Amino acid sequence: MLECTYMGPSLHFSRDTVIAVTGAPVATMVNNEPVAMWSRVLVPAGATVTFGLIEAGTRFYVAAKGGIDVPVVLGSRSTYIPGALGGIDGRKLEAGDVLPLGPASTRPGFPEVPEELRPEFSTSQNVRILMGLYDHKLTERGRENLLSGEWTLTPVADRAGLRYSGPGVEWRDSPQPFGAGADPSNIVDAGYAVGSIQIPGGTQPIILHRDAVSGGGYAMIGTVISADMDLVARATPGTTTRFIEVTMEEALTARRAYAERLERLNELTGQ
């Protein structure tokens, strides 16, 4: 499928196919005729599919029957642009690119994704986090600012990470270990989990997302639970966010609920 950020391409189809458009709400047209999102859409050979600007969120997705038939790299047909891996020469798409479709699946289709299984898009979010590993480096006031303050997503946001502005936090004044650097937000290099929250200098939290580096020298004061990572990815600059501390048990319960939603989708698609 194609991932489209903020605005979409113009797609010309040379054969009859079926598409579905999901994700952020966006006007979708086949030969200038509006069609519904989250539904099977028949596209005849010679038709052109176009899109407006998204109305909320950041990304929408275009899937075509048979999938986009590019080489498999590391078990995936996706594109990782920072590493120039996969897709078409490991880069974003350009005007004139030709995307071959694979053989159509014989699995029965379904008409649309039920409303209750579609994500919500909002200008305010509550993001659940597990505190640690380095939250002990925060003062009580710093911890309170993180969990009680309102944070706003800045325009510095992509698949690698999302930066937030807000009240800032306070770090404890304690000796730094050898090799950690002078700033209290620094640590001796360590591995980063996906969803780690770091606050370089104590000002703007950064949530590390799917394309982030896997390690470095900033303290991780918390981690977004896996069930809320999609929520974070849907946020647009200006989205107000509150970080809500949860327990490991609550995080695991949320993960199970998220997995059940995905299983319902898999049942619909015959996966």
Image (cartoon, rainbow, N blue to C red):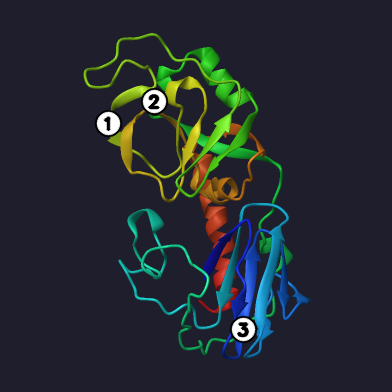
> Which numbered marker is on residue 31?
none
Q: Is residue 145 left or right of residue 194?
A: right
Tell me the element at label 1: strand
Give the percent coordinates (x, y) of residue 96. 51, 75
**Callout 3 touching callout 2 (CB < 8 Å):** no
**In the rendered structure, which disc, 1 or 2, sits on the residue that comes first in sequence?**
2
Q: Residue at x 31, y 34 (%)?
A: 216
Of badges 1 and 2, nearer the viewer stands 1
> Which numbered marker is on residue 134?
2
Work out how far the residue at label 1 is from the one at label 2, CA to CA, in angstroms.
Answer: 13 Å
Which residue matches tag 3?
Answer: 18
**In the rendered structure, which disc, 3 or 2, sits on the residue that comes first in sequence?**
3
Q: Is residue 232 left or right of residue 73?
A: right
Work out how far the residue at label 3 is from the one at label 2, CA to CA, in angstroms.
Answer: 49 Å
Q: Residue at x 32, y 69 (%)?
A: 73
Q: Nearer the viewer, residue 79 or 23?
A: 79
Badge 2 local density, few (<14 within 10 Å), some, or many (20+)?
A: some
Work out how far the residue at label 3 is from the one at label 1, CA to CA, in angstroms.
Answer: 48 Å
> Which numbered marker is on residue 189?
1
Identify residue type, mark 1: Asp
**Outermost residue toward the front?**
96
Give the percent coordinates (x, y) of residue 232. 57, 45
Residue 25 at least partly seen? no
**Outermost residue toward the right?**
33
Identify residue type, mark 2: Tyr
Give the percent coordinates (x, y) of residue 84. 34, 60
Badge 1 local density, few (<14 within 10 Å), some, or many (20+)?
A: few
As drawn, 243 above or below 29? above
Identify residue type, mark 3: Val
**In the rendered structure, which disc, 3 or 1, sits on the residue that comes first in sequence?**
3
